[in-house]
Image (cartoon, grey):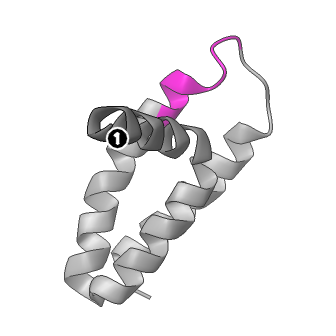
Amino acid sequence: MTLSLALACVWFVVANFRAMFPSKDQLWRFAYVMIAIAVPILIGVYVQNGPWIALILLIMGGWVMRWPVYYLWLWFKKRVT
């Protein structure tokens, strides 16, 4: 297991653990921080393990951070139409 995959596993554990507890801002600040941390980890996975593993982790990260992905999708739809 490469370092980037180990960091990705830690990222998933932390994101899932934090999502179990409610907060006043609906976890948005935490989501921004986790996305900022995930980008370099995902780049490292891409470099060390290839694009397919990085794509799988990107989809898994989108599953964990589903509300930011949903609102990004709505933003793109609004821009296109």
Q: Residue furthest front?
A: 81
The front one of 2 and 33 is 33
Indicate the quadrant where residue 43 lies. Answer: bottom left
Quarter of the image with the C terminus in it: top left
Q: Which residue range is magenta in the image?
A: 24-31
The stretch drawn in magenta includes residue 28 = yes
Task: Name the element at disc 1.
Answer: helix
**Percent position of residue 29, x then y:** 50, 23
- Residue 46 lies, with reference to residue 22, above or below; the image says below
Residue for point 19% across, 80% down: 47
The front one of 68 and 6 is 68
Q: Which residue is mark 1?
A: 76
**Percent position of residue 70, x then y:** 54, 42
Is 67 left or right of 43, judged from the image as shown? Answer: right
The stretch drawn in magenta includes residue 43 = no
Q: Residue furthest top?
A: 24
Residue for point 28% across, 34% down: 79
**Percent position of residue 34, x then y:** 46, 41
- Residue 15 lies, with reference to residue 28, above or below; the image says below
Sort mark 1 into few (<14), some (14-19) or many (20+) by Cα contacts within 10 Å.
few
